[in-house]
Image: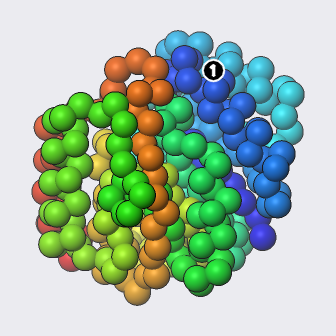
Amino acid sequence: MKILIGLPAYNEENAIGNVLRGIARFRDMSRYGIKVLVVDDGSTDQTKNILTGFTEQNSYLTVITHEQNKGLGEAINTILGYALKHMDDDDVLVTMDADNTHSPLLIESMIGSLDSNNLDLVVASRFTQGGCEIGLRALRKVLSRGAMLFFKLFFPIENLNDYSSGFRAYRVGIIREAQNRWGRLVTTNGFDCMAEIAAKFSRMKIRVGETPLVLRYDFKEGSSKMNVARTVRGYFSLLGKVR
């Protein structure tokens, strides 16, 4: 079984080095053979140079560069497309943020849960027992909890609470099945793209589990790139997109 960790990155010069070093430490202790893909989504800071240094030293790391910033959705589409091209249905794609708010150490238990429980998707969740957010502004907390209630009402998936979490372990086969059904799994380029994937999964027979996530927003370097109003509009637009 192959494991690919996919990271979308845009102007993460202050964090990407720490993230990749954390993944390297996890990779050294993991029982799985792990490769890493970073999609540099048109960064204008030193992200590209930092990634070049890491790729020269680590053969397991691949970088795909968008020459211009296309948005998180397009970066995720690139990761999904790469996984579908290079991986088999039983392989596992893990997506996580490149801003140092997600711990790679969770990946082992996520993959273990995926295998032992015969699941299609495991989400690292703030909203399951043992999960929480540290250092997140009150407005973002209200938004994330409101989003949870919205999606559980209109796009219910058994055992899923955190629809917007980008820290996920997918069985590649379920991505292929969804792509065949929807044609294009992600149609937005904003931060609502992860919720769009989950919303589309809600119309399929999918087996999902959650792993507690302690979201360390206090570890994040720099300001958030998320546009709250645009993300909320994107959530509501899914009512028309996903039938």
Q: How many marks?
A: 1
Q: Nearer the viewer, residue 65 or 137?
A: 137
Q: Residue at x 50, y 15 (%)?
A: 44
Looking at the image, what colour scheme do you see?
rainbow
Would residue 50 appear left or right of 210 to someone viewing this image? right
Tell me the residue at 41%/69% (across/down): 183
Is residue 163 visible from the viewing direction of this image?
yes
Residue 16, placed above or below residue 235? above
Amino acid, disc 1:
Lys
Give the vertical position of 197 relative to 218 (above or below).
below
Q: State the image coordinates of residue 120 (x, y, percent, origin top left).
A: 53, 76
Q: Quadrant of the C terminus?
A: bottom left
According to the picture, the residue beneath numbered tag 1 turns out to be 48
Return the x and y of residue 178 as percentages of the image width and height: 45, 74
Badge 1 density bin: few <14, some 14–19, many ≥20, Cα 10 Å: many
The image shows residue 49 at horizontal and vertical percentages of 68, 16
